[in-house]
């Protein structure tokens, strides 16, 4: 049995709270606008380092920004 | 994205221009082969400079673009006009995946091209640049696959 897991994040919501554009957030963590857009859409799972950098700019803990979502079991 | 398509077009044009520039050189070696076969004392070959014009033209365009966008271009001069996006971890990951896919495409295309070379004797007289075309199919496919994969970076 395999558990399908997805990493969900609150980057879009938190960015809106700080009133930053994707480019501004990208500059703060040293990535491109497209990378921030991909993370927000869930198309790209950031590395641990980038994830921690995002948490750092939002001044939040990892579990407040990222959450592991367990999907349906697969056989 | 525009820069990506420009780079793809320039890469394909470079491959085609290189193939065209080989035509007079193939004619030259054909003349030399005839000389050896017929044991003649001399031979004459007419080389048309026009076949080298696309390469020269591309070199001028690429030199202008390379100098014009000197600040933007981070890639080496020697791999121009290819692009190697690596501004952040996502770009590096996509570029690595594109390189991986392009490599495995060659694994499939190279034996096909080797198979196509078996038909060379049929084209020796009518299409002397056949081997050159077959060989250049390999970088053409490789470059096309690479660009189709890295376009995800800008989507």
Image (cartoon, rainbow, N blue to C red):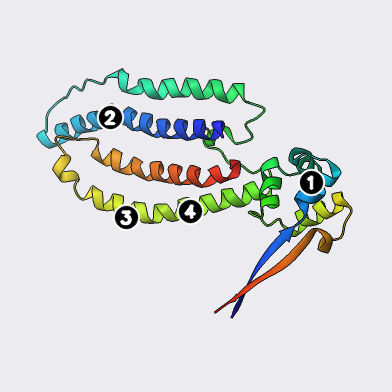
Between B17 and B85, the one nearer to me in the picture: B85
- For marks 1 and 4, give the CA distance: 29 Å
Are discs 2 and 3 less than 8 Å apart at CB? no
The residue that appears at 46% across and 50% down in the rendered structure is: B102
Q: Chain of mark 1?
A: A
Q: Secondary structure at mark 3?
A: helix
Between B46 and B126, the one nearer to me in the picture: B126
Which residue has dot 3 on it?
B111
- For marks 4 and 2, give the CA distance: 31 Å
- For marks 2 and 1, give the CA distance: 52 Å
Are discs 2 and 1 less than 8 Å apart at CB? no
Depicted B49 relative to depicted B3: above or below: above
Which residue has dot 2 on it?
B23
The answer to whether marks 1 and 3 sit on the same chain is no
The label shown at residue B101 is 4
Q: Nearer the viewer, mark 1 or mark 3?
A: 1
Q: Chain of mark 3?
A: B
Assign the C terminus of chain B to one quadrant of the image.
top right
Depicted B66 relative to depicted A60: above or below: above
Which residue has dot 1 on it?
A29
Q: Taking B103 as reference, is A17 left or right?
A: right
Between B96 and B51, the one nearer to me in the picture: B96
Between B141 and B59, the one nearer to me in the picture: B141
On the image, the x and y values in percent for residue A26 come to 76, 43
């Amino acid at each position: 049995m395999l558990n399908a897991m997805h990493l969900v994040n609150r980057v879009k919501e938190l960015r809106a709270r700080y009133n930053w554009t994707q480019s501004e957030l990208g500059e703060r963590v040293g990535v491109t606008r497209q990378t921030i857009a991909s993370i927000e859409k869930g198309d790209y799972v950031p590395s641990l380092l980038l994830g921690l950098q995002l948490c750092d700019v939002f001044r939040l803990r990892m579990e407040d920004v990222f959450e592991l979502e367990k999907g349906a079991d697969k056989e | 994205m525009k820069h990506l398509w420009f780079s793809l077009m320039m890469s394909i044009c470079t491959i085609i221009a290189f193939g065209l520039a080989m035509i007079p050189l193939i004619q030259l070696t054909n003349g030399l082969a005839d000389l050896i076969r017929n044991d003649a004392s001399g031979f004459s070959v007419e080389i048309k400079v026009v076949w080298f014009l696309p390469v020269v033209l591309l070199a001028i365009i690429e030199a202008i673009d390379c100098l014009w966008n000197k600040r933007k271009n981070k890639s080496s001069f020697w791999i121009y006009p290819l692009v190697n996006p690596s501004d952040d971890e996502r770009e590096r990951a996509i570029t690595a995946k594109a390189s991986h896919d392009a490599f495995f495409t060659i694994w499939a295309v190279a034996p096909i091209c080797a198979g196509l070379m078996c038909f060379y004797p049929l084209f020796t007289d009518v299409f002397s640049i056949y081997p050159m075309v077959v060989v250049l199919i390999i970088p053409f496919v490789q470059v096309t696959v690479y660009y189709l994969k890295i376009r995800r970076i800008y989507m």
